[in-house]
Amino acid sequence: MRLVLLGPPGAGKGTQALLISEKYGIPHISTGDILREAVKQGTSLGQKAQEYMNKGELVPDEIVIGIVVERIQQPDCNNGFMLDGFPRTVVQAEALDEELRKRKQELDAVLSFEVDEDEIVRRISGRRICEKCGAVYNINTEPTTKKEVCDQCGGKLITRPDDEPEAVRRRLQVYKSQTEPLINYYKQKSILKPIKAVGTVEEIFSRIEKALGEGVPS
Ligand code: AP5
């Protein structure tokens, strides 16, 4: 199965991606996670990307397209993959189409997460991530057992630099102007599946299972 998760910042894409990856046995490819790891390692990609990310701007298309094209050529993607946070512009969507065409493959579905802006701001303001392993928590809805300490690895919890209010405002603007047009792009290809992304994590996941149904080919 080849999936794309589309939705505004803080919509819960990463949270649902973990469950989808486990149930359907496909790798979770998050461009945000890949870029954050590069920033952490201080690679030249990370140094280039950090400046854009901290301001809430998109990293240039040619950089992220290169990352994704290389990643989906790995053997673990032979039976499918899930892209989280890519494509984010029409140029990226066209590049993905072109790469899949070369491989004689298609996307099976694009899950479009629908959630209003008040809820997004509430979720992002409560989000904390582990600076060591990247696990995601929320001080309001998914707190750790021990305050500010990761349940999985004992690392310290931090606020993502792009979760500061000014960067969040910019990310929302960028989403509206550059990413939202992809809803129509995929609607026209008849693979868009809108998902109401409010409620508990389990409720949203069961809507996703229903939307994907049983008939999706591998
Ligand atoms: P990226 O990491 O992709 O950020 P994003 O799309 O803005 O998404 P988020 O990670 O903010 O949110 P999410 O939807 O995954 O929500 P989550 O599950 O964490 O990108 C970051 C940056 O990298 C970009 O701004 C850009 O600079 C760059 N970049 C990445 N991809 C790029 C591309 N293709 N092109 C160019 N640049 C790119 O949930 C949010 C919070 O809510 C968590 O605390 C969670 O615990 C909580 N939560 C989740 N579900 C629920 C629920 N049902 N109820 C209550 N709380 C919930």
Image (cartoon, rainbow, N blue to C red):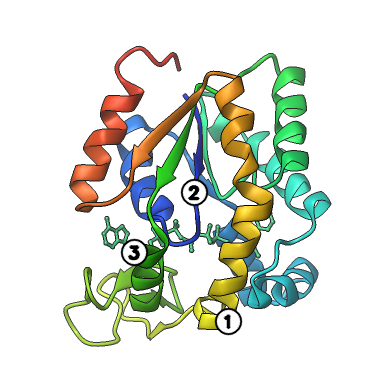
Q: Is the Cβ of the residue at disc 2 closer than 8 Å to that at disc 3?
A: no
At numbered mark 2, what does the secondary structure look like: helix, strand or loop? loop
Q: Give the residue type at disc 1.
A: Glu
Point out which mark residue 166 bears: 1
- For residue 10, what is the image quadrant? bottom left
- Are there few (<14), some (14-19), or many (20+) residues within 10 Å of tag 1? few
Tell me if mark 2 has few (under 14), some (14-19) or many (20+) residues whose alpha carbon lies within 10 angstroms of its own: many
Residue drawn at 22 percent across, 76 percent down? 144
Cα–Cα span, label 3 and label 1: 17 Å
In the rendered image, which residue does mark 2 sit on? Answer: 7
Q: Of marks 3 and 1, which one's residue comes earlier in the chain? A: 3
Q: Residue at x 66, y 68 (%)?
A: 38
Image position, residue 207 (x, y; %) = 26, 34
Of the image marks 2 and 3, the number of the one nearer the N terminus:
2
**Badge number at residue 119:** 3
Q: Is residue 66 left or right of residue 214?
A: right
Is the shortest distance between ligand 1 and the CB of mark 2 under 8 Å?
A: yes
Q: Residues within 10 Å of mark 3 (few under 14, many from 20)?
A: few
